[in-house]
Image (cartoon, rainbow, N blue to C red):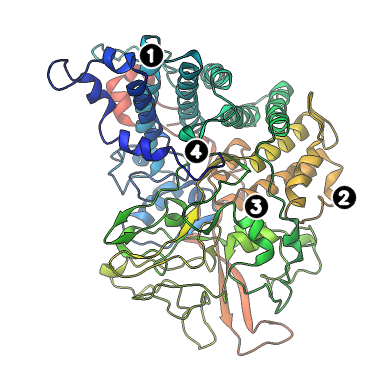
Amino acid sequence: MKTKKHLFALILASIFFSCEDYLDKVQGQDGITQEDVFTDVRTAEQYIDAGYFYLITEVSAKNNTPDILPGMTMSGEGYPGRFNNNVQERYQSYANSDYINIMNLAPGFDQRDTPNMVSRYFEAWKGIRVANTFLENVDLIANADEETINGLKGQAYFIKSFLYHLLTKRHGGLLYLENNLDLNQPFNGLERESYESNLENILNDVERAIEFLPVTWNSTNTGRPTKGAAMALKSRILLFAASPLVNTTNDQQKWVAAAEAAAELINFSQTNGLYTLKDASGAITMDVDSNGTDLFVPEPIALEPYRSMFVGPGLSKDLPQEAIFMEYNDFSFGFGGRLVPFPRMYLTAGFDIVKGNNNPMNIGATANFVDKFETKNGLPIEDDPSYNDQEPFINRDPRFYNAILYDGIPWTVTTSGPLNSSGFSDLAVVNENGVLGLDLHNPATAVNRLWQVRNTTGYRIRKWVPNGFYLRSGGNGEADFYVNNIIFRMAEIYLNYAEAANEAYGPGGVAPGANLTALDAVNIIRNRVGMPNVNGMYAGSQDLLRERIRNERAIELCFEGFRYDDIRRWKTATLEENKIVEFLEMRWQGGPSALYPTGFSFENVEQTNLRKTFDERNYWWPIPASDLEAAPSLGQTPGW
């Protein structure tokens, strides 16, 4: 994966036409037949490349637009500051448990008012059809060696299993198509299978992907999934399958299998010298005490080794060693200049970084989620007597300063037309000048200006926005930055192992073939940013360590598309802490005092209108009415 070249330029070129239309052309009429496509390895490769077009992850862009209802808002990590394109309405539909109407929205890549997960349902089936069609015809390839053909097979099995996991983790058991349906035959009579049946088939296809994919690709193919990517997919799938949502009897063998899968990839990466964690232990030395020299620095130097995994200067660079599989760093060209690297910047950036009709969501972090970041001492804020809720930004876990943009940090703005031209984040409800903070949304904003998004939560997300990126009028500007859209990275695998090993063996047990305990694995993730080991008061109990591992996932993987499915698979989405939404309200109190060391008061305020309704049926999503109309025998998801 370490190269400055990217495969997906080829992939993007290959998907401007429909692969099905491509095959429907008649020989002798300016087209080629299906046999022609698969006889030649070059066209067969282009065909499987089209399957990548349908890999819409939790944080992917569809048609280069941001997601109107991403997992990070459903999970409570953040809330958007965009007020048109039905953004608020879609959130309220979700919060009010109106899942049926959400799933029945118009699908497709050009439907900007449709959440990605709805489009993904339909697009995933297209990608599965591409993979199946390829596998049904791969034996026709006549001009390639076995290694090349195996690499193509491995990609097809990876695409298919990846897409089926995206579908089944939300909707439960579906049809598992070993071969494509005959579109000329009636669909009624088809029945959905169980999740367990789908799981068995998904894992069979993942194992085939692991078998056929190479350890690495040559430079011309860099960017395709590797054996390690398929192993990471297997780890993610088995962890989901072992979790309470699916593993209702707490079958310990499922936890063992999940631990073993993660351990296999950890051992594999070490044996092959791949996917090493970035050593950012020096980040703990940042001076982020009261008035510390690093407290109000947009890009602290000591944090750079960690932060460089996510964002940084330069369009061309070596990919991070920790990344196992990534999306292409996509830039859009137009209006005389480069636009935004998609998609994560669009989700988390506001108007002063992404202008107007480029559709920024400006998802701000919620205050109750931000409270999950521990102190530098390695304790939850409620357990650390040194923590002062009236000085909440100081002496936190170094990852806080990578993920969260808070009031007072200098931050580059656009050179023309910014809502906040001060050069500082101004997130106070009442700032030092006695007026509304310049980054906050003004409820009096005219309807025709609602595309100028502002902050609503009192925090902004720094993780996916490099300081210095900005646009001028007309779309051009300073965009010489990368944003890494990572799908799999090693930190997830260590946390997968920690969770599964703790459930199977407790804090000090070791899975077969592994050389780590659950406690070891979670401490590795903490130590690499300089955080101390899990405090001993939580380390001796399976139940207490479970909570710290879950919190560690929330922090390490924040805003990467994990948490919504984590709280579902843990069956904790019904807990009060996951239903409420709180914003941080800062108010100037006239100057520093013993009670208000910064001169501001800080208060987490619940937004009762955003509170989520969630009960048992909400753990699984319905399928669209169009599927039931085509095949009533499929039946709706239970509870819907």
Q: CA distance from mark 2 to mark 4?
A: 36 Å
Residue 244's quadrant in the figure? top right
Q: CA distance from mark 2 to mark 3?
A: 20 Å
Res 610 visible: no
Amino acid type, label 3: Ile
Amino acid type, label 1: Asn
Label 2 element class: helix
Quarter in which the C terminus is drawn:
top left
In the rendered image, residue 380, in percent from the top left (x then y), is placed at 75, 58
Label 4 element class: helix
Amino acid type, label 2: Gly
Q: CA distance from mark 4 to mark 1?
A: 50 Å
In the rendered image, residue 414, in percent from the top left (x then y), is placed at 40, 72
Q: Earlier in the sequence, mark 2 or mark 4?
A: 2
Amino acid type, label 4: Asn
Looking at the image, residue 284 lies above or below residue 92: below
Label 1 element class: loop
In the rendered image, residue 496, in percent from the top left (x then y), is placed at 68, 36
Residue at which label 4 appears: 618
Looking at the image, residue 276 lies above or below residue 354: above
Label 3 element class: helix
Residue at which label 2 appears: 536
Residue 261's quadrant in the figure? top right
Foreground label between 1 and 2: 1
Front-lying residue, 349 or 229: 229
Query: Dot 4, crowdedness within 10 Å: few (<14), some or many (≥20)?
Result: some
Q: CA distance from mark 1 to mark 2?
A: 61 Å
Residue at which label 1 appears: 143
Res 42 visible: yes
Residue at which label 3 appears: 555
